[in-house]
Image (cartoon, helix red, strand yellow):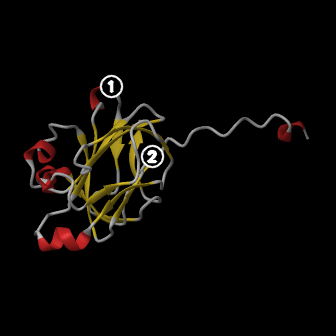
Amino acid sequence: MFNSLFKSKKTADTRIVAPVTGKCVDLSEVPDPMFSNKVMGDGVAFIYDGDTLYSPSEGIIAVVAETNHAIGIKCVSGIELLLHVGVDTVELEGKGFTSLVSKDQKVNIGTPLLKIDRKFMEENKINLITSMVVTNGSSVDIDIKGVNTTVEQGESEIIVEK
């Protein structure tokens, strides 16, 4: 009887899930040494057909690249994520990307972050493999799941804090 009176408030969602639906691959498959050599941190990459990147976690937008090709999220768990769309996309100077969020904005799992103009990218032969890395990995202990599987945006758990 008293359980319903003293229910704890909902805790923050600390899951980190797939930001897209597609294939989850090892960072070694990203044709950019900054990611394949894990210079930026450990994580995964995604190969997908969609045109929208969604928030993989609850948190705050820490950074939106001036060129809109990368977004940083400070997750409620303390993990800091970098989502980086494509190879050499910084050279596009923002063309083909529309940011749907701004710095310091609160996001939940599934909040749309970025729109990609697929037609423009295909016409310019841009590889859109998207990296998701933990940039503060030296201060957190993580497990990575889902590599070499098909994952569902918002559903498939990818990074778990130990």
Mark linked to residue 139: 1
Using residue 12 as the reference point, say whether residue 15 is left or right of it: left
Judging depth in this view, the residue of 59 and 21 nearest the camera is: 59
Corner quadrant of residue 142: top left
Image quadrant occupied by the C terminus: top left
Kindly report the distance in space between the C-alpha atoms of the residues bearing marks 1 and 2.
18 Å
Using residue 94 as the reference point, say whether residue 152 is left or right of it: right
Using residue 72 as the reference point, say whether residue 29 is left or right of it: left
Which amino acid is tagged 1?
A: Ser
Tell me, yes or no, if residue 83 can be seen here.
Answer: no
Task: Give the percent coordinates (x, y) of residue 77.
Answer: 46, 34
Rendered position, 121 above or below 72: below
* Residue at left offset 39%, top offset 38%: 103
Task: Give the percent coordinates (x, y) of residue 39.
Answer: 14, 37
* Residue at left offset 20%, top offset 62%: 128
Task: Give the percent coordinates (x, y) of residue 57.
Answer: 45, 46
User: Disc 2 on helix, strand or loop?
Assistant: loop
Task: Give the percent coordinates (x, y) of residue 65.
Answer: 26, 43
Which residue is the site of mark 2?
57
> Mark 2 Cα within 10 Å, few/some/many (few <14, many 20+)?
many
Tell me, yes or no, if residue 103 can be seen here.
Answer: yes
Numbered marks: total = 2
Rendered position, 32 above or below 119: above
Which amino acid is tagged 2?
A: Ser
Corner quadrant of residue 8: top right
Mark linked to residue 35: none
